[in-house]
Image: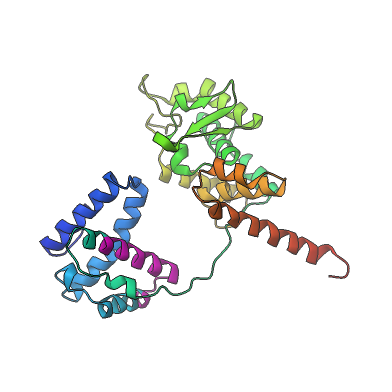
Amino acid sequence: MMAYLQTSPKMEAFYEDYVAYLREEKHCSPNTLSAYQRDMQKFFDYAEEFGIASFDGVEASDVSSYKQYLLRRGLSASSVSRSLSALRGLYQYLISVGAAEHNPAREIPNDKVAKKGPQVLTNKEIELLLAQPSPNDLKGIRDKAMLELLYATGIKVSELVSLDVDDVNLSLSFIKCGSGGKERFIPVYPLALKALTNYLEFSRRLLVVHPDERALFVNVNGDRMTRQGFWKLLKQYAESAKIYKDITPHTLRHSFAVHLLENGADLRAIQEMLGHADISSTQIYTHVVKKHLKDVYQKAHPRA
């Protein structure tokens, strides 16, 4: 459990058990667990401030007050909804192990959150971004390969930095992503393969410190590249390309999906490549494409 939690020993023990349950039984990723713990920290701050010493003593009125407490602190409606969702999940677990009789968070509704479509780069912006890394130094060659691979496959940045050299099949032009029963094989276009081959042949072998290093992408210290490290690089390249959108690593994933749809790709194929368990998660991209077409129509049709 995160060391900064300040609450009663009894609450802390149940919380530790729940985190272990999420990690070992639900197989939540480290990133998901970290996000959950950040959300729960808000509740523990509230509990400490208002003298709540046990989960079983929390009523719906307390959760309602907690919701207002979060809003007063300036959290967005989506952040408040996520925090309430984390609390509901905890109480469902507590009920299942007999540590609580009811779920007080279930009685408090989330505020409606206006759905924003995913941020997507245009084809021109993609070309500008991919052209930023220098082809004349080790880091630039590596960064070009990472950007190309992310846009070529639509994988998450956590999946990108988790790739090992053995996950790449250059001869058959695909990468293996995921683990256990969730593995998927994603094709890679020739330009990305060229950038990846260039990195493996000329850059990685000079960046790697330990000969037995398995990580595909490594930093200047020879260690596996981190999500934070890649995010920092992406921000720098977006600035140098003069792209002023709020770019995150997920922006390339969104752009991958939308650009495939715009060029006639099958939705089910995109679902499989993205690793979405539910087609509804992929369908959000069809709304982006439809909106784009409508905007083009409104601007271009003489009678629109």
Task: Tell me the quarter of the image containing the C terminus.
Answer: bottom right
Answer left or right for 12 relative to 301.
Answer: left
Q: Nearer the viewer, residue 78 or 4?
A: 78
Q: Is residue 244 visible?
A: no
Q: Position of residue 276 (x, y in %)?
A: 51, 47
Answer left or right for 57 relative to 248.
Answer: left
Residue appearing at x 32%, y 57% in the figure: 36
- Residue 179 image-quadrant placement: top left
Q: Is residue 212 magenta?
A: no
Relative height, residue 108 to residue 93 (above, below): below
Most extreme residue toward the left is 9
Residue appearing at x 25%, y 50% in the figure: 21
Q: Position of residue 66 (x, y in %)?
A: 29, 75
Residue appearing at x 25%, y 59% in the figure: 93
Q: Which residues are magenta?
A: 71-92
Residue appearing at x 60%, y 28% in the figure: 193
Q: Is residue 74 magenta?
A: yes
Answer left or right for 302 relative to 111.
Answer: right
Q: Nearer the viewer, residue 237 or 297?
A: 297
Q: Main secondary structure of the magenta part?
A: helix
Q: Is residue 304 visible?
A: yes
Relative height, residue 286 to residue 228 (above, below): below
Q: Position of residue 121 (x, y in %)?
A: 63, 52
- Residue 15 image-quadrant placement: bottom left
